């Protein structure tokens, strides 16, 4: 009930975030969920009414905020407030009642007429016209052009990863020029289309382990489900490199090399890009040097590159080389007995 | 006299007394709908955790994502993975998926159209378990009476009676039972008899996130399974079939039965399970003939010797 919100005077539950006030007469833990418990004994999150209304199920669970099912639903009606399509209608303007009604909770101010035009200098919701559905933007318009808030805007395009075995087929600039490269001896990078690293690599997860493994690699019940590091590779690439299913393979990038068991599987397919065959491999991320089971670390291969807007690490795509065999150096072994003291 | 009567009670009479068995309840079982299985192995882990079973060792099998490989005394749920992918490059073009997927049987809605698109293949997943046969070869073979059908009509090994002889291991046509390394006795899925006694759902069914494993009264499960097969056939999955929902000529019904999309042997199950004790009919006949001949070989010379 605290999340739903209530009137502080008598504890009566609120039905909508529109009832929230700044003067302390209401208290609400999360405005998004205001209205999920509109009255005692009624939990809209538990509702399971499968009735379809147009294209929404308005009484199946609770959809925040305010049980709205479709965002920006004002866009389903034309500038005069009539649905663009009768088959796809969602909300429409009712001039008699002076509000938006329809099959879904309107994602719009309920009483704002379609013809409303803001006066210069108005701010907030008052600055949004009656025919501007994208109410989370300051001007209520949908943006194809991002004039603000993205460092690598304003128009979207396709960039290849910083390390890619193929030329960018769509755009003349190969990779994102605003990408942050953390240069240094630990982060050598391969130039685009480097013949020494012709295979595309991606990192992936498995169900049985969790993230980089510290929380799952010490649990026997999970370890027996996925005990060893492996790399998934297509039959074509395996045949080309002499790698056998269950055999050892080495994956190398400019930054490091790992050895892992080869999972040769038809689920991995070579791609045809720009008329050329491009091979790809998938590297699970769950193993490390400590645990009841140990194995090679995927991040020994990945690069130190961060995306300009949120510093997201580009660990999901890079270029590598694969070969059959093992590394000629000591590998970590699992520690199964406690070390002797003294 | 008191002492003597007590000795008679404790040593001579008591060991032969049996308490009344619990009253029978409605037969409960599992319906495992493999079309819903996502291969998460929550069932394996939940079972191990509830029953405190040990891990079986860490060896990578390479058999798709199945490193458990088989049911055993310490693994009572096991998820099988079968990769059925065509040989095409790029995933374009239709690889014929064995087992009877026929796009032409699908009818007009958007869902049907999407389902009818040629697919590059499929990854079948199934959670295997003790089948809790309505008549169980392991129970017939058990010489100590350790294996019983409990009041829920599920097959249960009473651990304190089992002597570890291993006859049940040989008798099971599905390879469900083995003997434990720890205590030498046979162990298998109990269908969470302890949880059922307290009105709870078995651990695997409770943990299954897609409700691929469903626990309930047998008749309801069979009803539900048959409706599901019809639904799948309507969607073009003509290979969908039930395994063990009813008795065959050579094997009784299974109280833990399955919905499969292809031949059972693909999933590691026998296509035509055979009740091993059916072989014994001929053995008994030969034994009777042998007895008669042996007795005759002794008696006839004696008679002719002039008794």
Image: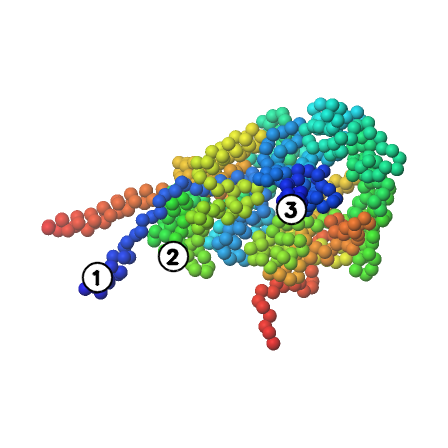
Can you identify the residue that label 2 sits on?
Answer: B160
Can you identify the residue that label 3 sits on?
Answer: A2
The spot of residue A209 in percent (x, y) is 62, 53
Q: Mark 2 or mark 3: which is in front? A: 3
Q: Residue at x 75, y 40 (%)?
A: A272
Q: Is residue A73 above or below residue B135?
A: above
Q: Nearer the viewer, residue B47 or B112?
A: B47
Q: Secondary structure at mark 2?
A: loop
Q: Could you say which quadrant of the image residue A21 lies in?
A: top right
Q: Residue at x 53, y 51 (%)?
A: B46
Which residue ends up furthest to the front in the rendered image?
A9
Report the chain holding disc 1: B
Residue A176 in view: yes
Which residue ends up furthest to the left in the rendered image?
B307
Report the chain holding disc 3: A
Residue A46 in view: no
Picture disc at residue B5: 1
What's the distance in space between the residues labelled 3 and 1, CA to CA? 71 Å
Q: Are marks 1 and 2 on the same chain?
A: yes
Q: Are marks 2 and 3 in contact (CB under 8 Å)?
A: no
Report the chain holding disc 2: B
Q: Residue at x 64, y 32 (%)?
A: A57
What's the distance in space between the residues labelled 2 and 3, CA to CA? 53 Å
Q: How dense is the environment of label 2, judged by Cα within 10 Å: few (below 14), some, or many (20 and up)? A: few
Q: Nearer the viewer, residue B229 or B60?
A: B229
Q: Is residue B166 above or below residue A160?
A: below
């Amino acid at each position: 009930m605290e999340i739903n919100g209530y009137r502080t005077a008598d504890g009566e539950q609120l039905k909508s975030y529109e009832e929230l006030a700044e003067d302390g007469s209401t208290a609400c833990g999360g405005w998004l969920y205001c209205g999920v418990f509109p009255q005692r004994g009624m939990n809209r999150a538990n509702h399971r009414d499968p009735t379809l209304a147009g294209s929404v199920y308005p009484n199946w669970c609770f959809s925040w905020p305010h049980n709205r099912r479709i965002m920006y639903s004002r866009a389903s009606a034309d500038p005069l407030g009539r649905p663009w399509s009768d088959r796809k209608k969602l909300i429409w303007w009712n001039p008699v009642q002076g509000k938006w009604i329809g099959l879904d909770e309107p994602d719009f101010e309920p009483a704002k007429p379609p013809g409303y035009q803001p006066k210069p200098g108005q701010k907030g919701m008052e600055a949004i016209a009656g025919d501007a559905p994208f109410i989370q933007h300051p001007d209520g318009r949908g943006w194809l052009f991002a004039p603000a808030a993205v460092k690598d805007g304003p128009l979207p395009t396709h960039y290849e990863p910083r390390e890619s075995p193929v030329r960018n087929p769509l755009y003349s600039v190969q990779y994102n020029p605003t990408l942050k490269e953390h240069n240094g001896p630990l982060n050598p990078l391969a130039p685009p289309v480097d013949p020494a690293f012709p295979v595309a690599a991606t990192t992936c997860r498995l169900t049985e382990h969790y993230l980089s493994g510290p929380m799952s690699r010490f649990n026997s019940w999970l370890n027996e489900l996925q005990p060893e590091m492996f790399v998934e590779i297509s039959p074509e690439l395996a045949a080309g490199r002499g790698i056998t299913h269950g055999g050892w393979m080495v994956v190398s990038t400019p930054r490091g090399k790992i050895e892992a068991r080869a999972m040769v599987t038809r689920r991995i397919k070579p791609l045809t890009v720009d008329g050329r065959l491009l091979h790809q491999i998938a590297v699970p991320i769950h193993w490390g040097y400590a645990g009841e089971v140990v194995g090679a670390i995927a991040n020994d291969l990945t690069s130190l590159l961060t995306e300009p807007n949120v510093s997201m690490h580009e660990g999901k795509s890079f270029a590598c080389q694969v070969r059959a065999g093992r590394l000629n150096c000591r590998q970590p072994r699992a520690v199964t007995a406690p070390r002797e003291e003294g | 006299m008191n002492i003597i009567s007590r000795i008679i009670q404790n040593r001579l009479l008591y060991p032969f007394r049996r308490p009344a068995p619990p009253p029978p309840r409605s037969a409960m079982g599992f319906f495992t709908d493999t079309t819903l299985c996502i291969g998460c192995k929550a069932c394996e882990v939940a079972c191990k955790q509830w029953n405190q079973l040990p891990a079986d060792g860490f060896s990578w099998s390479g058999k798709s994502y199945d490193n458990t490989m088989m049911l055993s005394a310490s693994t009572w749920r096991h998820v099988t993975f079968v990769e059925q992918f065509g040989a095409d490059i790029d995933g374009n073009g239709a690889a014929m998926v064995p087992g009877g997927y026929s796009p032409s049987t699908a009818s007009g809605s958007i869902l049907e159209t999407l389902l009818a698109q040629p697919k590059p293949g499929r990854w079948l997943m199934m959670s295997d378990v003790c089948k809790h046969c309505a008549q169980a070869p392991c129970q017939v073979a058990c010489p100590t009476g350790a294996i019983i059908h409990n009041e829920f009509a599920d097959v249960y090994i009473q651990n304190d009676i089992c002597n570890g002889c291993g006859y049940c291991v040989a008798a099971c046509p599905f390879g469900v039972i083995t003997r434990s390394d720890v205590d030498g006795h046979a162990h298998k899925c109990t269908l969470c008899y302890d949880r059922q006694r307290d009105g709870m759902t078995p651990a695997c069914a409770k943990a299954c996130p897609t409700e691929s494993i469903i626990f309930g009264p047998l008749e309801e499960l069979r009803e539900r399974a048959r409706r599901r097969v019809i639904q799948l056939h309507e969607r073009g999955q003509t290979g969908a079939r039930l395994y063990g929902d009813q008795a065959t000529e050579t094997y009784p019904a299974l109280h833990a039965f399955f919905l499969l999309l292809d031949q059972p042997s693909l999933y590691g199950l026998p296509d035509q399970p055979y009740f091993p004790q059916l072989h014994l009919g001929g053995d008994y006949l030969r034994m009777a003939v042998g007895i008669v001949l042996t007795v005759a070989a002794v008696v006839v010379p004696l008679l002719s010797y002039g008794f």
